[in-house]
Image: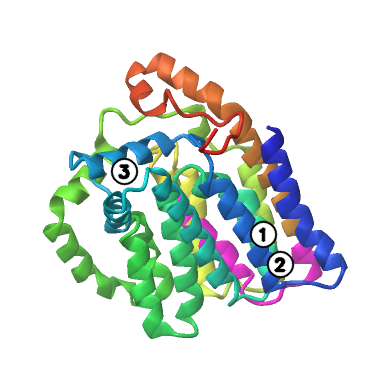
């Protein structure tokens, strides 16, 4: 765990230290931290629950023998990397770099840059940068689309579509961009019809498949409810309940998270609303009371991320013992100890 403790200490403490020297919300400082985070995630070895599946997909694309259907972004990346003769590490690193790039582009457009980045690292880094990296890239592109939506609306929609083409669950975020989001339904229906095999495979995998596995991690507890209360408090202090996008994000995030025991796939959908919720809350400058409340949330989510890492290997071993078929995907992946890909 030492490498993870060191990573989190550097990422989180650096911001508070430089703020003490008057460098608040400094783009150069944040860019440096984002680059370090990108290297930490992008140069890792077989770290992360899903990394084996991504590497297998990349290799299968190169061998022209892939049965797994991914969205265009990752397919194009895999085709380019294989054409250039790069190993599967190319996919892992490029995904990490893409996340870092779009987080930085989004941060440049918000006032509370420091606190958004602190929340991103504490809450999302492990899951998005080192685990479900395809969803991670989609959500980081989505974050950039959201900040553009109020400034360069014509550019925001193509960026949002790029997010959907990275992971289809980002399409749920259309509701945040306009009150008339339903106008996109004909286009959505056309896309489903045109690519019905792809969508049917996703529905089968996430919602009706017989191999959907539920674990103890699929149940929310007091910690989540307390976190939800902190977020609600911050929105109330900032008097932002009238902001439609914030209100919708909060309600959708809460409902999908609570509904995870019904379908684990709801966890992915809850993420589509949780990252925008923090982004929209911190788009403008907030009060000291809000920052203090967010520090509690940052501390709790950091603990949650580190606990996830500490317990993941044992959870995977238990999963494989109960369902031996998962050994094909997860037997060669691990979280501890952290290692670079050349080790």
Viewer-proximal residue among 162 and 56? 56
Spatial CA distance of label 3 from label 1 is 28 Å
Indicate the secondary structure of the residue bearing disc 3.
Answer: helix
Q: Are the two marked residues, 3 and 1, in contact with CB atoms closer than 8 angstroms?
A: no
Category of crowding for the residue at label 2, using alpha-carbon neighbours closer than 10 angstroms: few (below 14), some (14–19), many (at least 20) = some
Q: Quadrant of residue 241?
A: bottom right
Q: Which mark is residue 58?
A: 3
Q: Is residue 43 above or below residue 337?
A: below
Q: Which residues are magenta?
A: 269-292
Viewer-proximal residue among 328 and 110? 328
Which quarter of the figure is the N terminus placed in? top right
Residue at 72 percent of width and 72 percent of height: 25
Q: Are the two marked residues, 2 and 1, in contact with CB atoms closer than 8 angstroms?
A: yes
Q: Is residue 290 magenta?
A: yes
Category of crowding for the residue at label 1, using alpha-carbon neighbours closer than 10 angstroms: few (below 14), some (14–19), many (at least 20) = some
**What secondary structure is the magenta-colored segment mainly?**
helix
Residue at the spot of label 1: 33
Q: Which mark is residue 29?
A: 2
Q: Residue 18, can we see it?
A: yes
Q: Are the two marked residues, 2 and 3, in contact with CB atoms closer than 8 angstroms?
A: no
Spatial CA distance of label 2 from label 3 is 34 Å
The x, y position of residue 191, in whole percent, is: 18, 63
> In the displayed image of the protein, which residue is found farthest to the front?
85
Residue at 44 percent of width and 21 percent of height: 319
Indicate the secondary structure of the residue bearing disc 1.
Answer: helix
């Amino acid at each position: 765990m030492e490498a993870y403790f060191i990573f989190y200490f550097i990422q989180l403490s650096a911001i508070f230290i430089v703020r003490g020297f008057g460098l608040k919300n400094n783009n150069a400082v944040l860019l440096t931290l984002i680059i370090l985070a990108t290297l930490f995630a992008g140069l890792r070895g077989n770290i992360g629950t899903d990394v084996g599946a991504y590497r297998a997909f990349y290799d299968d694309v190169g061998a022209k023998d892939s049965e797994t259907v991914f969205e265009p972004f990752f397919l194009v990346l895999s085709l380019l990397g294989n054409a250039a003769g790069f190993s599967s590490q190319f996919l892992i690193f490029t995904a990490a770099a893409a996340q870092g790039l779009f987080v930085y582009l989004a941060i440049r457009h918000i006032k509370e840059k420091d606190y958004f980045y602190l929340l991103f690292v504490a809450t999302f880094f492990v899951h998005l940068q080192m685990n479900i990296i395809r969803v991670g890239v989609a959500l980081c592109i989505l974050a950039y689309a959201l900040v553009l939506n109020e400034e360069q609306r014509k550019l925001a929609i193509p960026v949002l579509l790029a997010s959907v083409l990275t992971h289809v669950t980002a399409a749920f975020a259309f509701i945040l961009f306009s009150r008339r989001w339903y106008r996109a339904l004909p286009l959505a229906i056309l896309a489903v019809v045109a690519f019905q095999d792809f969508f049917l495979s996703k529905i089968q995998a996430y919602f009706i498949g017989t191999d959907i596995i539920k674990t103890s991690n699929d149940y929310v507890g007091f910690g989540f409810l307390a976190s939800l209360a902190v977020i609600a408090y911050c929105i109330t202090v900032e008097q932002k309940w009238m902001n439609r996008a914030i209100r919708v994000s909060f309600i959708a995030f809460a409902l999908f998270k609570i509904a995870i025991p019904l379908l684990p796939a709801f966890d992915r959908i809850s993420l589509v609303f949780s990252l925008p919720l923090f982004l929209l809350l911190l788009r403008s400058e907030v009060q000291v009371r809000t920052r203090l409340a967010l520090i509690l949330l940052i501390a709790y989510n950091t603990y949650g991320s580190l606990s996830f890492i500490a317990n993941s290997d044992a959870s995977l071993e238990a999963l494989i013992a109960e369902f031996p078929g998962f050994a094909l995907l997860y037997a060669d992946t691990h979280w501890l100890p952290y290692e670079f890909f050349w080790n």
